[in-house]
Structure formats: structure tokens, C-alpha cells
Image: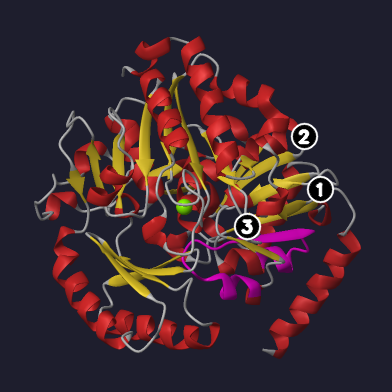
Amino acid sequence: MARNGRRRSSATARQEAAAGKPLRAVLFGPGVVAGPAAAHAAGGLPPAGRTPDAGDALEARPPRPLPGALRLLRQLRAAGVGTALFSAGRAAAVLATGGLSGLFDAVLQDSDRARGGLRGEPDPDLLIETASALGVAPGEAAVVEASATGVAAAVAGGFGQIVGVDRRGEGEHLRAAGATLVVGDPAELRLTPARSLAVQTLAAVPSAWEHLEAIRAALRGRRLLVCLDYDGTLTPIVADHARALLGEAMRAAVERLARRCAVAIVSGRDLALLRRLVPVEGVVFAGSHGFEIAAADGSFAPIERGVEFLPELDAAEQALRAALAGIAGHSVERKRFSIAVHYRQVARADEPALHAAVAAALRAHPRLRRGLGKKVVELQPDLPWDKGEAVLWIAERLGFAAADAATVYLGDDITDEHAFRVLAGRGLSVVVRSADARPTAADYAVADTAEVQRFLELLGAIAAAQGGPGGAAP
Ligand SMILES: [Mg+2]
């Protein structure tokens, strides 16, 4: 530990010396720019009501470029900051994923120096050589890396800024190794005007209204798929979630938009309930955070993820209802593929007991995972599936995955960040701002649901101008 501590303090000293110096280059590790692919592949899911078989396995997928890295790479290049990919053995595989090869000024690979064996983690010399290939000193460069070994190599190499990307809940390991900044996804990183990397928080997201020209330019000439969260996006957050009903003006706005382009409602709500809450023809509904997807008009067969988890969800629901019986103000909302425990009306003193009951249910059912939202904690099947994968699945299924189409996503909560991440650098994401201080991957922000409605009118006008009702056809 002492050695780690010394290493960290000398690294801190070097970083302090480098502080204020604008970055001249950013070096990326392979795990930051490419990852497992195609959980959403339209052919890879069983139809609703059928238990998945071995053919549905999500393993052994080839890597895909991670969109958050695409956006950051483009931003860096536009600002004249050098970019490089380093890898002890995997660079070729990463570049072969497509969409990435033109975005690096240098690619360094050295399989002889691999310390991490198959994981392809680098040593300090490889990083220093990579910086030197770009003509910059390590102190003038940042390293963005997903492994603790890579972060430690960057510390030893004396790099000016070291960013850990925490893909597997290992943020503490990355910090302990010396990362000065840890993010969940490179989509949360921005280059500041002073040319350092910073986390984009909700308060710092640029307002959509101040960037209308950029938004129009991003969508120009492309068929639109607009995905909308429900609570907090189409309806204001209210004390009792059961009373979050869609206002007529918003309903009419969604209906008008759905006549001009493809629209999907992507919500944590149960699918059957969501269809009643949003009575609009011609839209796609994704309920239970995307675990169940159906078209309002039945134009494609509904799909479900996690059918094999239903008995476990039933048992956990029973146990939770019993364990929470003594806590006033809570409400347990069972959705087909999720159990939501709402606590907006629970006394703060009772919150620890509520979270303890949820933790106990998760220990008893380790195949379920915890999902967090605004004053709600959920138990869901622990599958590589979320709103982001659901949005990619819908885009692919409806024919909007091609370059002549764009997916737009509006949402307000933590679960929407999954969609913001997968659309970074490819589609357009708009967050409904709140007082939360969380990091966000969204491109732009609007203030509230009233501004969401205005933004839907804008999207409708853009869709109408470039093809009208036919614009939604695949
Ligand atoms: Mg929401």
C-alpha cells in the first residue's frame, strides 16, 4: 500500500505540474473504444412467450465501436488534439470493428510487451512510445483506459491526465490505481475550452435551444426514429407515480409527431400499462426498461427478454411485499420484467430499512440486479439488456440503423443514460434537466416537459420538411 501511495503522490505532483497545460494528445486503450456487440441484433432474440435457447446466447460476439468514444474522438480531432490507440495485442481487432480507423493519428501495438496476457493491457513504455509517435511529452497527454493495469501504466509513465472508464463497477480499482477521473462511459467526457478532459454533468449540458442549427444539421436529410421516455419526459414527476397521466396537449403532440416519423415510447413502466397511458396509434412501445417491446399496430411480433426470470421475479416480489409491510408510504409496482419499489413518499428515517429489504431480496435472488431511478429502486433480470439495447433493437427492426436514418432519444433519468450512451456520436440525445448532479452522456438538454413538447414540435417540423409522412417508411 505504501508503494502505491508514494506512486500516487508522485503522479499527483506530476499532474499538478501539468495542470493548466492544455492537452495536446489523448491516448485510448482498446477497451474504451470497442466492446462486446450486438446484444440488440434483431435476429438474436426469442419471440414473446418463448424461453430463449442456446442459440440466443449473447457471448462470443465480435466487438463493436463504442459510440461514446466515437463522439469524443471526433471532438478531439476537431479541436486539433492528437489521438492515438495503444494496445498490447488487440489493436488490429479493435480497428477492424469499423468506423474507428480514420479517427486515430497513431496506432501502437506491441504484443511482446503484453503484461495482461489475453486482456491486452499495456506497460508504461508502450504508452510513452505512443505519445512520442504523436510528438508530445507524456505530461502533455491524457490516457483514457478501462483497466487498472493500464491506469497504473499511465501513472508510471507520467501522463498529464489519467481517466478510468468503469465498465464493470470497478471504479474503486481504477481510482486506487491512480485514475484522476473515473467515468462510466467515454460519452460522459468532454474537452473543456481550456483543453482538459472533464466529466459532463447534467448542469453543464448545452441547451438544445442554443444549438438548433447544429441539431438541424445533424438530422438533415435523415429519416427519423424518435424514442421517448415517459415519466419525467412526457409527464412531470409527481408524488404518486400512479397519478402520472399524459396530458392531452402532450398526447396530441406525440400523435402529430407519429404521423410524420417513427416514434417509440421507451419506459420503465409495464408494457400493458404503458399502452394504456399513451393512447397513440402507430407507435412502438418498449416497457419494463426495454425488456418487452411491441408495435401498437402489431406490425412486428412482440419480443421479450428474461422470460426465464419470471418465477424469480414472482418470488422476490412476494418477499419484498412482506418485508416492506411495516414501512409507510412505499409502493411496490410489479411490471412483467421488473419490480419497482417507489419511496418518494417514505419518511427519510425509513429509507435505510427499505434499501436493506431490497438488498436482502437481491441476496436471496442473485440472478436479479438492482436498477436505480428517481426515488425508485428496481429489481430486474441481470441480463446485458437495457434501454440502450432496446433502442438499438427497435432502430434495427424498423429499418433505422442505416446511415440515412437518425435515432433521437429524449429522457430524464439514470436508465435513459444507457440510450444516451449508445447514441453518442451516431444519433441525438436530449436530457430533461433536473437538480441531479449526475454525469450524463446526453448531447443537449431541455428544461422541463413543456420544453419537451416544444422540441417534439420542432422534430415534427424537421421530419415534415424532409419527406413528410413517408419519411418514416423503412
Ligand atoms: Mg423518466
Decide if residue 55 is on the left or right side of residue 17. Answer: left
Crowd rating for badge 1 (residues with CA inside 10 Å; few <14, some 14–19, many 20+): many
Please say if 172 is above or below 147: below
Crowd rating for badge 3 (residues with CA inside 10 Å; few <14, some 14–19, many 20+): many
Residue found 60% across the figure and 58% down from its top: 145
- Front: mark 2 or 3: 3
Upstream in sequence: badge 2 or badge 3? 2
**Magenta segment range?**
153-175
Residue found 56% across the figure and 31% down from its top: 455
Please tell me which residue lies in front, 273 or 352: 273
Residue to which mark 2 is pinned: 79
The kind of residue on which mark 3 rests is Pro
Q: Is mark 1 on a helix, strand or loop?
A: loop
Residue 79 drawn at (x, y percent): 77, 34
Residue to which mark 1 is pinned: 23
Queried whether the magenta region covers residue 161, the answer comes back as yes
Q: Residue 364 carries which label?
A: none
Q: Determine whether label 2 and label 1 are within 8 Å by CB.
A: no
Please say if 342 is above or below 80: below
Upstream in sequence: badge 1 or badge 3? 1
- Any part of residue 72 in sight: yes
- Any part of residue 200 in sight: no
Please say if 139 is above or below 425: below
Residue to which mark 3 is pinned: 439
Q: In which quarter of the image is the C terminus?
A: top left
Q: Quadrant of the N terminus?
A: bottom right
Residue 5 drawn at (x, y percent): 73, 84
Q: Is mark 3 on a helix, strand or loop?
A: loop
Please tell me which residue lies in front, 119 or 283: 283
Crowd rating for badge 2 (residues with CA inside 10 Å; few <14, some 14–19, many 20+): few
